[in-house]
Image (cartoon, helix red, strand yellow):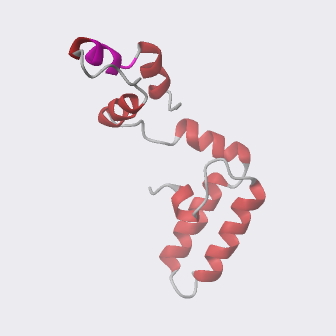
Amino acid sequence: MTDPFLTLGIEPDAEDATVEAAYRAAIKRCPPERDAAAFQALREAYERVRTRDDRIAYRLFDTEPPAAIDIIRQAATHGSNADAADPAVSQAASRPTPALFAALLRGED
């Protein structure tokens, strides 16, 4: 299943009114008479994230966990700027802390 936030063109933290407005705009662009499959995809996306509680539940339970390489890349971008002249310092400083890894695994930045 595709990401309902991408399908509707909204952010995961969008308000209910924003979600409804995005859905209404999308069905005007793609009415069921023109493309029934696309309309069904829009409808399913809207149903999955219609309310704040639905969006929270989707983000908690219906999303795939991030790939390990994505976690590692994200952790690397959080590293401090180490002294490049000392490779030992540079290597140690570029490693993410266990707390950062745990936060990234939970989906936090």
The residue closer to the viewer here, 49 or 103, is 103
Q: Position of residue 69 (x, y in %)?
A: 29, 34
Q: Is residue 77 above or below residue 83?
A: below
In the depicted structure, whether residue 20 falls above or below residue 95: below
**Image coords of residue 94 (percent x, y):** 33, 21
Quarter of the picture containing the N terminus is bottom left
Which region of the structure is painted magenta?
Answer: 89-96
Q: Is residue 105 left or right of residue 23?
A: left
Q: Which residue is the extreme one toward the left?
A: 87
Quarter location, residue 70: top left
Give the residue at x 57% y 60%: 45
Residue 6, image x, y percentages: 52, 59
Using the image, determine if residue 10 lies above or below residue 105. Answer: below
Residue shown at the point (63%, 61%) measured from the top left? 46
Seen from the viewer's position, the closer of residues 20 and 98 is 98
Is residue 31 in view from this perspective? no
Q: Is residue 57 above or below residue 49?
A: above
Q: Quadrant of residue 84?
A: top left
In reply to whether residue 107 is colored magenta, the answer given is no
